Image (cartoon, rainbow, N blue to C red):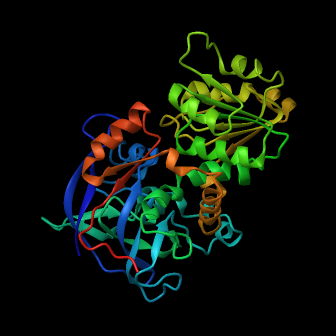
């Protein structure tokens, strides 16, 4: 099947993705695969970050097709696929093997094969149309920056009973990673309760997902932290009790700013920025027995150094967070239900771009004036039953 796709080539400029629209060939599905007509895909910082490292670093290969917040309609199914049929609308999330100990105990985000299967993918499902050069695809099991993609069955959430109108596919597309991660950070990993004081560093899709979930949980204090005032203003509208602008001239340290709001510090710190100084200050900003969740992608080869005696005496917990420890089959319907109830207003964060306008979407993400860019593929024959 012929398709247009955004192909990621090895970066020319350091730490900058090198993308271009190309003609590709998409292979039919194997036994455990599904071919999907992609209607939309959110851009996540992980798409950018893992397109901006040199070939070989972290095992990354080029050329490849990224994209891991896809939504579309099933065109064909492999013989082992039972969760969807041709014509079903689907939302896509991450790959998991379903067989390892983590998957079998309902923690698919910590699948034994998560890193190679999601961050690197494989060759086979997609290749260049011109020279037949194989592409690395099935990024997060899906590679949804393409008009059509053959995806692994584990990525699929059947949306037949979840959407009310075909236009909702593009609205719900970004639920597969960013918002899900933020939601699960609060609900599954931090296991927040109403008495918690939550601080959230970085108000992208992950941070906003955490903010809305903390509000739903009725956490008594929610501190939103960012350098973009418009994001802080929106956070205040959506439930933040306090905001901190790290660009303000009166900002000294995160610890001082947080403790000026609550003297004991936060009981939960959600760190989504990946900025080394914020990563380190998050620890000092938490109270005794506080939980620090690291989500943002840190600088390559970055190591965190802590005063172990102080950390032990304070009883703090440092927790990694991948996909919010979510099962997408549960998390995505839950977020859609909250959206229906007016508690998870996705429309406040999403901005749509034609897929060919991806440079504009990337610039909006970089500048901070777009929280969740969503690339839309315009099909002459959109499939939806």
What percent of the width, then of the height, locates residue 351?
A: 41, 46
Q: Does 30 sit above or below residue 132?
A: below
Q: Residue at x 56, y 75 (%)?
A: 161
What percent of the width, then of the height, locates residue 31?
A: 42, 85
Which part of the image, by quadrant, shows the N terminus? bottom left
Q: Residue at x 46, y 61 (%)?
A: 140
Q: Residue at x 17, y 68 (%)?
A: 132
Q: Residue furthest left?
A: 130
Question: In the image, 175: left or right of 384?
Answer: right
Q: Does 107 sit above or below residue 354?
A: below
Which part of the image, by quadrant, shows the C terminus? bottom left
Q: Does 80 sit above or below residue 90?
A: below
Q: Residue furthest bottom?
A: 79
Who is closer to the viewer here, 117 or 186?
186
Q: Residue furthest top?
A: 250
What percent of the width, then of the height, locates residue 157?
A: 53, 71
Q: Does 251 sit above or below residue 235?
A: above
What percent of the width, then of the height, locates residue 209?
A: 61, 47
Who is closer to the viewer here, 74 or 166?
166
Numbered-mark total: 0
Question: In the image, 96: left or right of 119?
Answer: right
Q: Residue at x 68, y 69 (%)?
A: 101
Q: Quadrant of residue 304?
A: top right
């Amino acid at each position: 099947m012929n398709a247009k796709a955004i192909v990621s080539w090895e970066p020319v400029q350091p730490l900058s993705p090198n993308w271009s629209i190309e003609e590709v060939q998409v292979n039919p599905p194997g036994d455990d695969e599904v071919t999907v007509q992609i209607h939309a895909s959110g851009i996540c910082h992980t798409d950018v970050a893992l397109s901006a490292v040199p070939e070989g670093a972290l095992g990354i290969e080029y050329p490849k097709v990224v994209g891991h917040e896809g939504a579309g309609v099933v065109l064909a199914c492999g013989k082992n696929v039972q969760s969807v049929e041709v014509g079903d609308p689907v939302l896509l999330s991450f790959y998991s093997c379903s067989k390892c100990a983590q998957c079998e105990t309902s923690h698919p985000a910590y699948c034994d094969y998560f890193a190679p299967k999601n961050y690197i993918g494989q060759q086979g499902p997609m290749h260049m149309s011109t020279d037949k050069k194989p592409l690395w695809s099935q990024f997060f099991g899906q590679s949804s920056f393409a008009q059509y993609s053959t995806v692994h069955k584990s990525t699929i959430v059947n949306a037949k009973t979840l959407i009310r109108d075909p236009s909702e596919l593009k609205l719900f597309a970004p639920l597969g990673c960013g918002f899900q991660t933020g939601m699960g950070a609060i609900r599954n990993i931090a296991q927040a309760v109403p008495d918690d004081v939550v601080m959230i560093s970085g108000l992208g899709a992950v941070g906003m997902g955490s903010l809305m979930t903390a509000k739903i949980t009725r956490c008594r204090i929610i501190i939103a932290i960012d350098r973009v005032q418009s994001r802080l203003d929106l956070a205040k509208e959506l439930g933040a009790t306090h905001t901190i602008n790290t660009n303000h001239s009166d900002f000294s340290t995160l610890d001082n700013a947080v403790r000026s709001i609550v003297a004991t510090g936060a009981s939960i710190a959600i760190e989504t920025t990946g900025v080394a100084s914020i990563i380190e200050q998050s620890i000092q900003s938490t109270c005794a027995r506080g939980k620090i969740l690291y989500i943002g992608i840190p600088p390559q080869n970055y190591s965190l150094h802590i005063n172990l005696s102080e950390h032990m005496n304070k009883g703090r917990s440092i927790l990694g967070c991948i996909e919010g420890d979510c099962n997408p089959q549960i998390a995505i319907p839950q977020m859609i239900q909250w959206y229906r109830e007016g508690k998870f207003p996705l429309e406040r964060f999403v901005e749509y771009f034609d897929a060919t306008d991806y440079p504009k979407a990337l610039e909006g993400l970089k500048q901070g004036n777009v929280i969740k860019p969503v690339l839309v593929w315009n099909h002459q024959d959109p499939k939806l039953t």
